[in-house]
Image: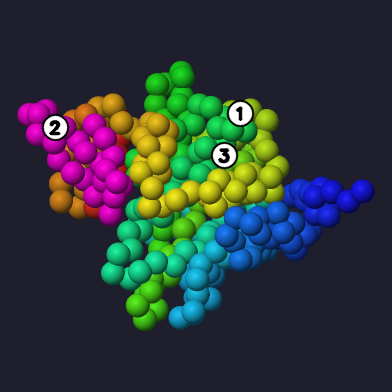
């Protein structure tokens, strides 16, 4: 008797990269993804997807790499990850150029990823506004960064091609020796790390089920937030604000109540840094 399992045998990160991509493409064909490619090395998965964008692009493409030589974070900061130690994945979307909001797409990736990781047993993970995934450090009371999200776009006629990349530290590495200015963590520090192919499948399955227009996206975001309710210092391009993080809007902005009781809206695009007080 044939079964779904025998028709599409599961791949693991021990299999060749092309086999991983073929498996994920078949496993996720009903989730709205047109192709999933897995490669050994590239400069940047985000850049690769953006370069391939055409005027007829409808999104739904996924590119995963074992290693990036030019991985990027916010403000062109370098994203550092040793070969085979992280899940480095980018997903493409298509949107109306006049209505596109990069923050919504980035938040969708963060929600899908955080939900996937928590379903795999990492229930201590939260979303730090706007879209970092962090783990609470019980000894220091602070937050350590597990994953970062970067959204980019380019206009093609009346459409915006949006690419969102995520880098998740999975296996042990020397990343703490490279990044010393802030706390970082990997899944291996928190428990038994999942196979990266399986992790990608769970994240993308969650992402395929998300409705970016539904209030449920933001309900899930608020439920997973590790920022709402915190006293924080927010540094933006316009200045410094301090107060309590009250809520996240349907556009991904942070509502911050300052010490005078005034609620101010902070747009994620203006953010330089956010730290707990």
Q: Position of residue 202 (x, y in %)?
A: 62, 44
**Badge 3 local density, few (<14 within 10 Å), some, or many (20+)?**
many
Give the mark, 2 or 1, whose residue is nearer the N terminus.
1
Is 257 included in the stretch rendered in magenta?
A: yes
Left or right relative to 14: residue 276:
left
**Badge 1 local density, few (<14 within 10 Å), some, or many (20+)?**
some
How far is the residue under mark 2 from the one under mark 3?
Answer: 34 Å
* Extreme-front residue of the structure: 1
User: Which residue is drawn at the image coordinates 84% and 49% (left, top)?
Assistant: 3
How far is the residue under mark 3 from the one under mark 1?
Answer: 9 Å
Left or right relative to 235: residue 191:
right
- How many numbered discs, if any? 3
Left or right relative to 75: residue 82:
right
* Extreme-top residue of the structure: 139
**Badge 2 local density, few (<14 within 10 Å), some, or many (20+)?**
some
Q: Position of residue 246 (x, y in %)?
A: 24, 32
* Extreme-left residue of the structure: 260
Q: Which mark is residue 116?
A: 3
How far is the residue under mark 2 from the one under mark 1?
Answer: 36 Å
Residue receiving disc 1: 121
- Residue 127 seen by the camera: no
Span of residues in magenta: 246-269
User: Which residue is drawn at the image coordinates 63% and 65% (left, top)?
Assistant: 35
Residue receiving disc 2: 258
Q: Position of residue 126 (x, y in %)?
A: 44, 33
């Amino acid at each position: 008797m044939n079964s779904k399992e025998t028709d599409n045998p599961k791949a693991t990160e021990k299999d060749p990269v092309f086999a991983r991509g073929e498996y994920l493409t078949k496993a996720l064909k009903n989730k709205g993804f047109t192709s999933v490619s897995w490669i050994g090395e590239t400069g940047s998965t985000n850049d690769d997807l953006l370069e391939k964008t055409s005027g007829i692009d409808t999104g739904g493409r996924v590119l995963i790499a074992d290693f990036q030589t030019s991985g990027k974070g916010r403000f062109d900061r370098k994203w550092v990850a040793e070969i085979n130690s992280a899940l480095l994945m980018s997903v493409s979307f298509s949107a109306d150029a006049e209505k596109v909001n990069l923050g919504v797409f980035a938040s969708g990736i963060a929600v899908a990823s955080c939900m996937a990781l928590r379903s795999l047993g990492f229930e201590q993970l939260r979303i730090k506004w706007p879209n970092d995934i962090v783990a609470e450090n019980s000894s220091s009371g602070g937050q350590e960064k597990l994953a970062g999200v970067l959204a980019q776009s380019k206009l093609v006629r009346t459409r915006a091609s949006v690419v969102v990349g995520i880098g998740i530290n999975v296996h042990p590495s020397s990343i703490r020796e490279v990044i010393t200015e802030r706390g970082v963590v990997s899944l291996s520090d928190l428990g038994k790390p999942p196979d990266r192919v399986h992790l990608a499948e769970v994240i993308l399955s969650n992402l395929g089920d998300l409705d970016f227009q539904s209030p449920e996206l933001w309900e899930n975001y608020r439920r997973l937030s590790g920022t709402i309710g915190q006293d924080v210092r927010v540094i933006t391009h316009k200045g410094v604000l301090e107060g309590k993080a009250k809520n996240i809007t349907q556009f991904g902005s942070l509502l911050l109540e300052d010490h005078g009781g005034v609620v101010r809206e902070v747009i994620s695009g203006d953010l330089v840094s956010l730290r707990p007080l």
